[in-house]
Image (cartoon, rainbow, N blue to C red):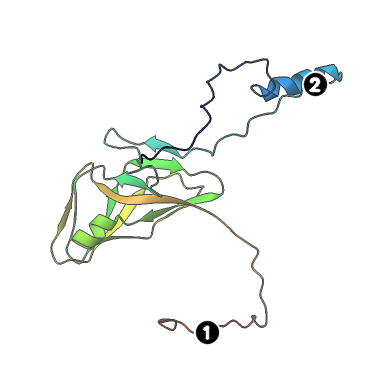
Amino acid sequence: MSATSPPHSPLPKRQKPNPTSPSQAPSQSIEAAMSAAGETPVPVTKVSAEPPLLIKKLSDKARLPTRGSAFAAGYDLYAAKDTVVPGRGKVLVDTDISMAVPEGTYGRIAPRSGLASKHMIDTGAGVIDADYRGQVKVLLFNHGEKDFEVKEGDRVAQLVLERIYTPEVVEVKELEESVRGAGGFGSTG
C-alpha cells in the first residue's frame, strides 16, 4: 500500500498589482472617497528621524565614531595620537573631535570590554553634557604593572548616548519604607 498526500487546493496564481483596486492602493481609495464627499485630503508631515550626533574633526588625525555592529549600544572612540598609559597610572587620550549630542541626551564614555579584560585598561570621568563643545578626551586607567601603548587610530573607549531625566529636587522629612531598606554594599547577596 502506498502512502498518498491528502488532496489540496492549487496555489493561487500571482496577480500583478492593480493601482485602481482599493485593496491594492488604500490611500487612493481614501482620497477618492474624500473627493466624492467634497473634502480635500490634508498632507501629513512625516515624523522626523532621531536627531543626529554632530561631530567636528579638530585635526586630520581625528576619526568619526563608529559602531562595531548593527545592535552595538555605543560608538567606538579613536586615539588621535600615540600615547602611553603608565603601569598603575592614568593618562588623557586625545580624540581630536568635538561633538554636540542630541538634545535630551548626554554622552557617557564607557570602557571597551576587550581592553578591560585583556589589558586591565579602564575609563573614568566620562560625561559629555549637551552644551559641551570642547575636545573629547578619554581618561584611561592602567590597572596593570606594565605600561600600555596606545597607537594612533586605536579604539580606546565607547561613547554611549543616554537620555536625561532631571526631576525637581524635593526635600522630605522621611522616605517611604522599602523591602530593602538601608541595606548597602553586599546586602542583597
- Residue 45 placement: quadrant: top right
Tell me, yes or no, if residue 34 can be seen here. Answer: yes
Q: Residue at x 30, y 37 (%)?
A: 62
Instruction: Classify 48 as above or below 29.
Output: below
Q: Which residue is mark 1?
A: 182
Q: Nearer the viewer, residue 91 or 45?
A: 45
Q: Nearer the viewer, mark 1 or mark 2?
A: 2
Q: Residues within 10 Å of mark 2 (few under 14, many from 20)?
A: few
| Residue farthest left in this picture | 146
Residue 15 image offset from top left, x and y in percent: 56, 18
Write the residue at 68% across / 25% down.
26
Q: Is residue 4 above or below residue 143?
A: above
Spatial CA distance of label 1 from label 2 is 65 Å
Secondary structure, mark 1, is loop
**Image quadrant for the C terminus?**
bottom left
Q: Are marks 1 and 2 in contact (CB under 8 Å)?
A: no
Amino acid under disc 2: Ala
Q: Which amino acid lies under the numbered mark 1 shown in the image of this protein?
A: Ala
**Of marks 1 and 2, which one's residue comes earlier in the chain?**
2
Disc 1 residue crowd, few under 14, some 14–19, many 20+, Cα 10 Å: few
Q: Which mark is residue 5?
A: none
x and y, in percent, of residue 131 in the image: 51, 47
Nearest to the observer: residue 27 or residue 132: 27
- Seen in the picture, residue 137 relative to 144 is either above or below; the reply is above
Q: Position of residue 122 (x, y in %)?
A: 28, 61
Residue 120: horizontal and vertical position, in percent? 22, 63
The label number, if any, that marks residue 33 in the structure image: 2
Q: Residue shown at 47%/38% (left/top)?
A: 6
